[in-house]
Amino acid sequence: MIETQTRVITPNGAKYAQQLCKHFAHKIPATFSDGHAECRFDAGTAVMDADGDGLTIKVSATDSGGAERVQQVIESHLLRFAFREQLSAFQWGPIQ
């Protein structure tokens, strides 16, 4: 199992997590409740937790290719949804 995470600094973390879930829900299982979101892709799962300062995104997959695909999908969509903000580059690393 490959597990990675990143932290996105934004005051709109809960909004973006909910927006991502609503966007993906027509194709994959996706849930959102109280700042916690889960999106289950074929390649792996993304779990997002929002707080007042940002959004923590954790990805788990059976292999590195799956983890990279889920990271790329979440990152590209989040950047598109947050186009009004200047989000810093995503720094994915192992879950500590």
Image (cartoon, rainbow, N blue to C red):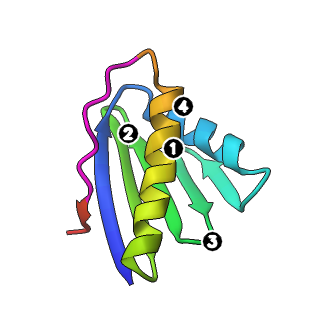
Quadrant of the rendered structure where residue 87 is?
Answer: top left
Question: Which mark is on residue 15?
Answer: 4
Residue position for label 1: 35
Residue position for label 2: 51
Crowdedness near tag 2: few (<14), some (14–19) or many (≥20) residues, C-alpha within 10 Å: some
- Point out the image quarter for the N terminus: bottom left
Sequence-wise first label, 2 or 1: 1
Q: Is residue 95 visible?
A: yes
Question: Which mark is on residue 42?
Answer: 3
In this rendered view, identify the residue nearer to me: 48 or 70. 70
**Residue type at numbered disc 3:** Asp
Q: Main secondary structure of the magenta part?
A: loop
Q: In front of the other: label 3 or label 4? A: 3
Image: magenta residue range: 85-92
Q: Tag 1, which secondary structure?
A: loop
Q: In front of the other: label 4 or label 1? A: 4
Residue under the point 37% across and 25% down: 11
For the residues bearing labels 4 and 1, Cβ distance under 8 angstroms: no
x, y percentage for residue 27?
76, 56
The span from disc 2 to disc 3 (Cα, nearest Å) is 27 Å
- Vertical comparison of 29 with 14: above or below: below
Crowdedness near tag 3: few (<14), some (14–19) or many (≥20) residues, C-alpha within 10 Å: few
Q: Tag 3, which secondary structure?
A: loop
The span from disc 3 to disc 1 (Cα, nearest Å) is 23 Å
